[in-house]
Image (tube, rainbow, N blue to C red):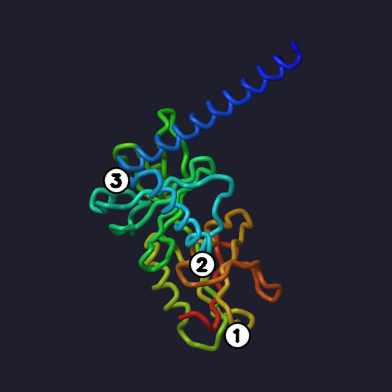
């Protein structure tokens, strides 16, 4: 009988602990929602928010490799004028969605109307628990968000992998519509002019997320350096333009 009572007590303790953990993580999720609401606008009720997060995760997941093991906090840009001084939101528009992955420390700015990823940035949790979204230039802060500056622009080398003259100039213009701070370090012809697909190559091999972001800008494909091509020494990314580039 004592053994049976002990077992019951142990089971009860496990159940209580599980409920306490669930309550804690739910409370943390609601806290993150409130912080996002302070910055960007009203967050829907829990059921609608979870449904929206699921739909957005499915859409964005087709364009970008999302963090696994957690659901994002989703917010909507409702007053872009208050965010324009922050680099992460430099190209934002009202109605854009922000997916915040606190555990993976990543934020994604997505535009549903055009099905495009506008910006990706790392997120840290400040001592106060406020999300920190890292931008690419000046320092700015508002409400719960602080923007951490980095002054180093992305360096991109452009190779024309087709026989179409002037394609690298067109690509440069298109890229700078999305990132005005980038530097074009080279505009050259590729070794081959028969590339069918536009390739985006992370030359360092350490920043796949950056390559994926730029691939969305020009509808390219993230790839490794083809064996026939030379690695550009003064660039973060190498983009080889294919016949599919428009």
Q: Residues within 10 Å of mark 1 (few under 14, many from 20)?
A: some
Residue denoted by label 3: 42
Which quarter shows the C terminus? bottom left
- Residue found at x 57% / y 81%: 161
Picture mark count: 3
Element under disc 2: helix
- Please say whether residue 235 is visible from this viewpoint: no
Pointer 3 local density, CA inside 10 Å: few below 14, some 14–19, many at least 20: some
Decide: marks 1, 3 in contact (CB < 8 A)? no
Camera-side residue of 97 and 8: 8
In space, the residues marked 2 and 1 are separated at their CA atoms by 20 Å
Quadrant of res 207 = bottom right
Q: Earlier in the sequence, mark 2 or mark 1?
A: 1
Pick the front one: 201 or 70: 70
Foreground mark, 2 or 3, reads: 3
Q: Position of residue 82 (x, y in %)?
A: 24, 48
Say which residue appears at 70% left-offset and 14% top-offset. 5
Sequence order check, earlier mark of 1 and 3: 3
**Viewer-nearest residue: 10 or 145:** 10
Q: Which mark is residue 215?
A: 2
Tag 2: Cα neighbours inside 10 Å, few (<14), some, or many (≥20)? many
**Would residue 130 be visible to someone looking at this image?**
yes
Residue farthest to the front, as pictured: 1
- Is label 3 in a helix, a strand or a loop? loop
Whole-number angstrom distance, CA of label 2 to CA of label 3: 31 Å
Mark found first going from the N terminus, 2 or 3: 3
Q: Position of residue 228 (x, y in %)?
A: 69, 76
**Residue 193: numbered disc:** 1
Q: Which mark is residue 182?
A: none
Tag 2 and tag 3, C-beta contact below 8 Å? no
Viewer-nearest of discs 2 and 1:
2
Q: SS class of the residue under badge 1?
A: loop
């Amino acid at each position: 009988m004592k053994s049976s009572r002990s077992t019951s007590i142990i089971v009860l303790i496990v159940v209580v602990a599980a409920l306490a953990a669930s309550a804690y993580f739910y409370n943390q999720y609601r806290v993150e929602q409130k912080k996002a609401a302070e910055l960007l606008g009203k967050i829907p009720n829990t059921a609608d928010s979870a449904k929206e997060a699921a739909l957005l995760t499915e859409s964005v997941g087709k364009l970008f490799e999302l963090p696994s093991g957690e659901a994002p906090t989703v917010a909507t840009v409702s007053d872009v004028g208050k965010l324009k001084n922050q680099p992460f939101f430099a190209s934002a528009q009202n109605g854009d969605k922000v997916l915040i992955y606190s555990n993976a420390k990543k934020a994604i700015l997505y535009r549903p109307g055009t099905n495009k990823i506008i910006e990706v940035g790392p997120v840290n949790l400040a001592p106060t628990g406020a999300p920190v979204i890292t931008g690419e230039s000046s320092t700015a802060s508002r409400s719960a968000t602080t923007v951490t500056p980095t002054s180093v622009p992305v360096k991109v080398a452009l190779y024309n992998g087709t026989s179409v003259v002037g394609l690298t100039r067109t690509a440069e213009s298109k890229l700078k519509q999305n990132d005005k701070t980038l530097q074009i370090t080279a505009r050259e012809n590729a070794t081959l002019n028969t590339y069918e697909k536009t390739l985006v190559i992370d030359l360092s091999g350490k920043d796949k997320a950056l390559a994926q972001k730029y691939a969305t800008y020009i509808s390219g494909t993230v790839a490794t350096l083809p064996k026939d091509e030379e690695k550009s020494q003064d660039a973060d990314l190498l983009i080889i333009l294919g016949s599919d580039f428009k």
